[in-house]
Amino acid sequence: MLASDESIRVIHMVAKYQSISAAAERLNKVPSAISYTVKKLEEAFGVQLFLRKGCYIELTSAGEYFISYSKAILDDFDTLKRNVQMVHEGGERELKVAVNNIVPQAVMADFICDFEHTFPSTQISLQQEVYNGCWDALYGNRVNLVIGAPHAVPSTEGIVSEPLGLLTWDFVVGSGHPLAGETHTLLNSQLRRYPAVCIRDTAVNFNPMQAWLLDGQKPIFVPDFPTAIALIRRNVGIGYIPTHLRRDPAITGLVKKSTQEQKHATRLFLAHRPEALGRSGKWCVDYFSRQRVRQHVCGGNVAWPGTAPAIA
């Protein structure tokens, strides 16, 4: 007799209740069937798993090892069953998602929680991209879909994109910066005197872009917004940050200023290749098509007019 998940579960139940009859009752089987399963499994392994002591039985040392080691085997059986069923129903084993670094982190945390609850057997991998790096990851087939890809689909290669909305920006300086006390609209000639704190575009095959950098201005490249904000607060540099970050009560020491050439709001898209999505990927598209979720992705801003999906 080869060990099966059913026979292993029988052994676990007998060990738990230290009784053939009690295990039989819990499993809705006759005691003789339980005894037969235990006997055949012991014969298959060539060891005694239980010591009989009157109406009760207890594990031998070999039996204790069997129980301990087979817990992982049962978990593997359960995982195998879920994954086979998932594949049968059109689900993915893994879903790779790229997210624009300007999308609020709280939105993505909510998304992953909801995804895990709905698709516990699908492994989700989330990676952060900057600017054209979002499109680069999708066109390079490194991800299945992108959340918050900026501006517009760069080329016609069967990419489906759906507008999410507009994410606005605020120009900020530190409260102790020389420009903090200026009451007029800041001119480019004034801004060029100070370094611009920039987050480098993660694009590899696309032309990298800058969110904001004036001609002749010194850039300070940093990996993320927490670092950028920390430098601006310490008056090392100046720059734009998403409005939703500037409004965060936890972020202090920044002064919003008006500039000669105000940065326009960024149009954000949900983009994917239709053939690269299974059941969980399609669920993600529906998830981010909800008006409430789209607004949260864009930091609370509403979508711009004309939100019909576009196919490039």
Image (cartoon, rainbow, N blue to C red):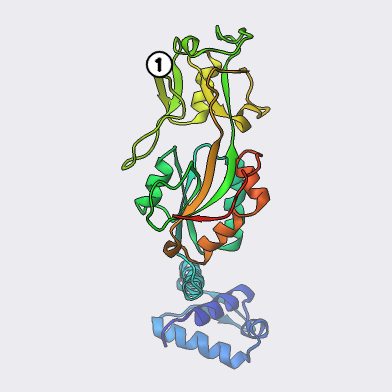
Query: Residue 58, located in which quarter of the rendered image?
Result: bottom right
- Which element carries disc 1, helix, strand or loop? loop
Instruction: Identify whether 138 is placed above or below 87.
Output: above
The reply to whether residue 120 is visible in this rendering is no
Nearer to us in this view, 4 or 159: 159
In the picture of the structure, the residue carrying the numbered disc 1 is 217
Query: Residue 285, located in which quarter of the rendered image?
Result: bottom right
Instruction: Identify whether 170 is placed above or below 308.
Output: above
x then y, percent, for residue 75: 50, 68
Residue at the image point whose x is 52% and y is 28% from the top: 226
Instruction: Identify whether 236 is placed above or below 221.
Output: above
Query: Which residue type does callout 1 highlight?
Result: Gln
Query: Residue 246, located in which quarter of the rendered image?
Result: top right
* Residue that lies at the very extreme toward the left in this rendered image: 205
The reply to whether residue 49 is visible in this rendering is yes
Nearer to us in this view, 188 or 286: 188
Instruction: Identify whether 111 is placed above or below 200.
Output: below
Q: Quadrant where the N terminus lies? A: bottom left
Q: In this image, 55 relative to 261: left or right?
A: right
x then y, percent, for residue 166: 59, 39
Residue at the image point whose x is 40% and y is 16% from the top: 217
Nearer to us in this view, 77 or 27: 77
x then y, percent, for residue 98: 46, 48
Residue at the image point whose x is 54% and y is 40% from the top: 267
Q: Quadrant where the C terminus lies? A: bottom left
